[in-house]
Amino acid sequence: MKMDFTKRLHQACEELELFLSTDQQKTLLRYIEQLAKWNKTYNLTALRDPEQMLIQHLFDSLSIIKPVSTYAAEKDLKSLNIVDVGSGAGLPGVVLAIACSTWNITCIDAVEKKMAFVKQMAGVLSLSNLQARHTRVEELPSLNADLITSRAFSSLLDFVKLASKHVKPGGMMLAMKGKHPLEEIVELESGSTWKVSTIEPLIVPELAAQRCLVWLSSEGSL
């Protein structure tokens, strides 16, 4: 792991207004280090360079922590039950679990080797609030989650069709996207009872690309 990663992560946390302890930041870097190591054998992510993983995986996942924390505070939720759908190697699920110990994270993916990696991270990084399920999300009984997250998983319409049964009444679905997904929103709102509540722009440190967080609810309002 490059020596400047510690400094860059610290700077990214400051930019994102995240107050993570030194131990949490070390754990995040251990996760990226393990991801780079496992990826050489198991092909968990298309990114090969730890430099790219730092920015496009870690910093990108960290960018949603403040919006989710704000939501929890507004709802007066001391803890959150979050299901991360199509989690891959645990993005953003593992990052959320490291950053927020009161959030219970369940990562779900249909690729067995990716969930094996997440299970390994739960043990190696001592994350008692992290679980991994190797299955298709639509095949599970309802998980009664406060929030369902996805990152590059599917279209908004497919997201709600496959995973909305896991949201408890009043809960939300969050889709991490690049540019404003106008066509997907039209498709979603004409093909389901789910609506876009808000689209929150995300600033990812060191990344010169558009990112946004799409909040979905069955009523269309927070």
Image (tube, rainbow, N blue to C red):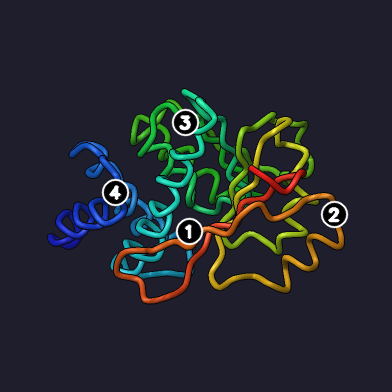
Q: Which residue is mark 1?
A: 42
Residue 103, numbered label: 3
> Which residue lies most toward the right here?
191
**Comparing marks 2 and 3, which lies closer to the viewer?**
2
**Comparing marks 1 and 4, which lies closer to the viewer?**
4
Is tag 4's residue or tag 3's residue first in the polypeptide sequence? 4
The residue tagged with tag 2: helix, strand or loop? Answer: loop
Is tag 2's residue or tag 4's residue first in the polypeptide sequence? 4
- Please name the residue shown 52% across and 63% down the image: 212
Q: Amino acid at mark 2?
A: Ser
How many angstroms separate mark 3 from mark 1 (CA)? 28 Å
Is tag 3's residue or tag 1's residue first in the polypeptide sequence? 1
Is tag 1's residue or tag 2's residue first in the polypeptide sequence? 1
- Please name the residue shown 40% across and 65% down the image: 56
How many angstroms separate mark 4 from mark 3 (CA)? 18 Å
- Packing grade of label 4 (10 A; few <14, some 14-19, many >=20) is few
Q: Are marks 4 and 3 in contact (CB under 8 Å)?
A: no
> Which residue lies most toward the bottom here?
208
Q: Which residue is mark 4?
A: 17
Q: Amino acid at mark 3?
A: Trp
Is tag 2's residue or tag 3's residue first in the polypeptide sequence? 3
**Comparing marks 4 and 3, which lies closer to the viewer?**
4
